[in-house]
Image (cartoon, rainbow, N blue to C red):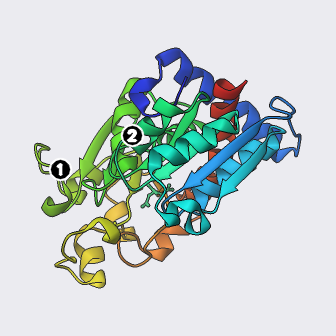
Amino acid sequence: MDLLSIDSLGDDQIATILDRADVHFAANRARQASSALTGRVVFNLFYENSTRTAMSFATAAHRLGAAPVFLPVEQSSIKKGETFEDTARTLNAMRPDALIIRHRENGAPAAMALVMDCPVINAGDGTNEHPTQALLDAATIRQHFGRLNGLKVAICGDIRHSRVARSNAALLPRLGATVRLAGPPEFLPDGLTPLSVDDAIAGADVVMMLRIQRERLEADLDDGPGEYLERHGLTAERLARAAPHAAVMHPGPMNRGIEIESAVADDPERSLITLQVEMGVAVRMACLELLAV
Ligand code: NCD
């Protein structure tokens, strides 16, 4: 079994991942290691930059007793012109127990899965999906509120380029939450009813801000940084429109002072951003355990 998209998971598998993530979260805090995957080898291929996701998958593998192995893409034979399929066949011949892949092209993890005999996990492909991010977001919300059912989640910013938004829009409604996607019109995908950040935030239980993905933009922004924050970013003033108990999330990396004001990102009462990172390790442990046992 592969984990390529949210739709590739059944409801029972999602429930298992979220429940096991809670168990791993508590065990990690208590510094109790698991030996569920002792002797297994997990390959990590990051063709795009990553801090959180790469470190989190590696930490998850270690905490389960497995050995994460990184391919340093910049120094690999990919740079000598090897085709993607040849790289896949080469890696498959080493018989890893799981392979994690992030790639700038939509569908690259699915192409990798066609060749690999082991489970393949999508760690973010282009503008398509980032399923483990959505799972860790769901687990974080559930940890904080004790439930997902009935919550209103506003996802705001560069929706058009966001694989995080796409995976969350597929996952959270399956768990009973309502998702509102909002941003400046140029950042909303065609076919989506335009919604301003102000309107999306009104009464929301969770406000999830997204990074402006400059590397995927054809032209630079019309607004300067201060102007973007003023018009579409999360300031304390704008957050006051949300429910009084509203929580703030961001998948990272943040552009402070652009899509989110520093004071809001660092607000210990409201911000779940560090909790998201901590939960990320637990969720990826749950995913590896489900797939690679
Ligand atoms: C996101 C990604 O790479 O898709 N980051 C992450 O994995 N935590 C979001 C982003 O790059 O803005």
Q: Position of residue 179 (x, y in %)?
A: 31, 39
Q: On the image, numbered disc 2 is attached to which residue?
A: 167
Q: Which of 71 and 135 lies nearest the eye of the viewer?
A: 71
The image quadrant of residue 51 is: bottom right
SS class of the residue under badge 2? helix
Q: Residues within 10 Å of mark 1 (few under 14, many from 20)?
A: some
Q: Position of residue 58 (x, y in %)?
A: 71, 50
Residue plotted at (34% across, 70% down):
215
The reply, left or right, for residue 250 in relation to residue 56 is left
Which mark is on residue 189?
A: 1
User: Vertically, is 276 above or below 120?
Assistant: below
Give yes or no for contact between labels 1 and 2 (Cβ–Cβ under 8 Å).
Answer: no
Compared to 263, does 190 lie above or below?
above
Q: Residue at 18% of width from left, 54% of height from top?
A: 188
Give the percent coordinates (x, y) of residue 169. 33, 38
Question: SS class of the residue under badge 1?
Answer: loop
